[in-house]
Amino acid sequence: MTHTDPLPLAQSLLRCASVTPADAGAQAALADSLRSLGFTITPLRFGPIENFFARIGSGSPHFCFAGHTDVVPVGGNWASNPFGGEVRDGVLYGRGACDMKGGIAAFVAGAAQHLAKAPLQGAISLLITGDEEADAIDGTARVLDWMAANGQIPDFCLVGEPTSQVRLGDVIKIGRRGSITAKISVFGTQGHVAYPARSDNPVHRLVRALAALTAAPLDGGTDWFEPSTLQVTTIDVGNPANNVVPAAAHATLNIRFNDRHTSAALAAWLRATLARYAEKFEIDFSVSGESFLTTPGNQVETLRRAIADATGTEPRLDTGGGTSDARFIARHCPVAEFGLIGSSMHQVDERVPVAELRALAGVYARVLEAFRV
Ligand SMILES: [Zn+2]
């Protein structure tokens, strides 16, 4: 295997059916490849999940690449074997081709190109998890705890998620919005609709509270973020009778929020608003991530320049989309995300052109050089 070409490693990884939480040999294949480049591997198994940390070099700066070897389920009918690693007409097919086994293979090839060119000044590491696509409980967050306890927090971390939109190099993510879901139940007093004075209608209380929550925008956005948004996703009463005031009414809403908010402050606001309209209510919160931002400075500029030089495309700094494991990394060190064009991620016939995969390896090599690793 020539390590400077990402294709053979990408194919080996795609041939492992590593649908979360299965690993199916993916991390062993990756670790073997890294070992032959001189990396030291520390396996970090948490619960049912395989993870590892790999490092080469002891100098500074310490540059870390973060990625996941797990993939989402296959879904519908594919034209090619989703775990075959097949190349047809210059395109590599397979579940995980762009999200994100292709990105991982490109980083390993980029690191090999960098190591072949000049002696290492700093250190390169990889934070690899098998738990990104599901709950992310036994993955990146726990590997970071281990890294912090063992003096392995890097100076900068690059997550290799597919961030490019139309052309390789057009988008770098420097932050993400947070996400909180609230399941609301409002309780009243059941009764006959003809005698409303004897009942207390929770539906009326709930819709007034929701009207208040949606009456004004949460904010006007920031330099780097779109305005936060609140969306009511369902209102449920399930009352089969037209002559009964129900005892309870339920609704669910989700807020995607920028760095002007925290989930705790939003939860307090939701509670206070509900309390103005309902005497008896319950709210069940689930937070899938806080918002974070790596404020653009020298490191983001170095990354942006390296990508622009290698691709000929000027990257835009962006904070859109869903959450990613970068939310955990941001608590420890500066982090940005850059990778392949993500248009086929999670879809049937997920794929990446081999030329794009090889171009990304070259970009990652250029980034390592620019950071003087
Ligand atoms: Zn991913």
Image: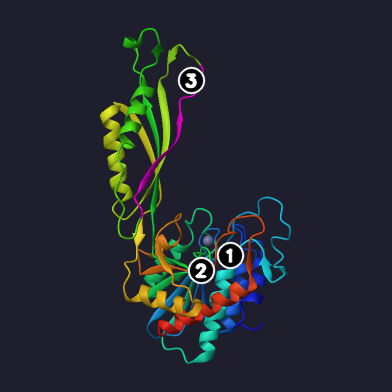
Cβ atoms under marks 1 and 2 closer than 8 Å = yes
> Dot 2 corresponds to which residue?
339
The amino acid type found where label 1 is placed reads Cys
- Secondary element under disc 2, as helix, strand or loop, is loop
Mark number, residue 239: 3
Question: Which circle's residue, 1 or 2, is located before the other in the chain?
Answer: 1
The image shows residue 219 at horizontal and vertical percentages of: 29, 48
Q: Which mark is residue 98?
A: 1
The magenta-colored residue range is 226-240
Q: Is mark 1 within 8 Å of ligand 1?
A: no
- Closer to the chain start, of discs 3 and 2, is 3
- The kind of residue on which mark 2 rests is Gly
Cα distance between the residues tagged 1 and 3 = 46 Å
Give residue 207's position: percent from left, percent from top: 36, 28
Position of 271 relative to 316 (above/below)? above
Mark 1 surroundings within 10 Å by alpha-carbon count, few (fewer than 14), some (14 through 19), many (20 or more): many
Q: Quadrant of the N terminus?
A: bottom right
In the rendered image, is residue 151 in sight?
Answer: no
